[in-house]
Image (cartoon, rainbow, N blue to C red):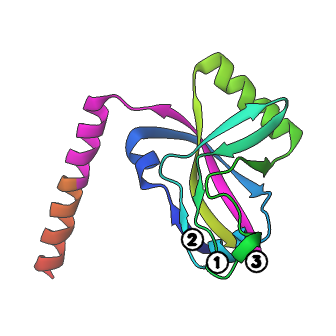
Amino acid sequence: MKVIANNKKAYHDYFIIDTYEAGIELQGTEIKSIRNGSVNLKDSFIRIKNGEAFVENMHIAPYDQGNIFNHEPRRLRKLLLHKKEIRKLEKSIQEQGLTIVPTKLYFNTSKAKLEIALVKGKKLFDKRNDLKEKAMQRDIDKAMKNRY
């Protein structure tokens, strides 16, 4: 599994409840651009319309040698999920007020896969608390390393 892009902002802003693996419907030069690593997941999110899941605002840069066959960088891309998974996600969004965001883009064999997560927003004090815990863990690791 070769990870192309991570969405670090999602881990900072949300509590991850559940993750799913989804395929992406891509056009022509998009896969070549993904192989070059020209992808940004930072502000992207998943929306469900008419029983289909779409990723919005995911930026895939145009391919350098793509000329007239290039794609639009922030176009709407369909996600390939099972109907049961889509229904389950849609139900949890409506009932519990959760959100779906992409967390990782990677290659599984030769196919590009998107890891999506069902998330709940963090409050400001939760974010501060996480930063404190990370800093304390870093200090502990540094002390343990110096000890040996």
Q: Is residue 13 above or below residue 51?
A: below
Residue beneath disc 3: 109
Q: Residue at x 85, y 37 (%)?
A: 84
Q: Residues within 10 Å of mark 1 (few under 14, many from 20)?
A: some
Q: Residue at x 60, y 44 (%)?
A: 117
Q: Residues within 10 Å of mark 3 (few under 14, many from 20)?
A: few
Which residues make up the magenta segment?
108-134
Quarter where residue 14 is shown: top left
Q: Quadrant of the N terminus?
A: bottom right
| Distance from the alpha carbon under mark 2 to that under mark 3 | 13 Å
Q: Choose between 118 and 60: the one closer to the eye.
A: 60
Q: Single out the mark in the foreground, 2 or 1.
A: 1
Residue beneath disc 1: 35
Earlier residue among tags 2 and 1: 2
Q: Residues within 10 Å of mark 2 (few under 14, many from 20)?
A: some
User: Residue type at mark 2?
Assistant: Ile
Residue beneath disc 2: 4
Local secondary structure at mark 3: loop
Earlier residue among tags 3 and 1: 1
Please check the rendered image and state whether residue 99 is part of the magenta-colored stretch, yes or no: no
Q: Choose between 109 and 133: the one closer to the eye.
A: 109
* Label pair 2/1, CB-CB below 8 angstroms: yes
User: Residue type at mark 3?
Assistant: Thr
Local secondary structure at mark 2: strand
Q: Residue at x 69, y 77 (%)?
A: 32
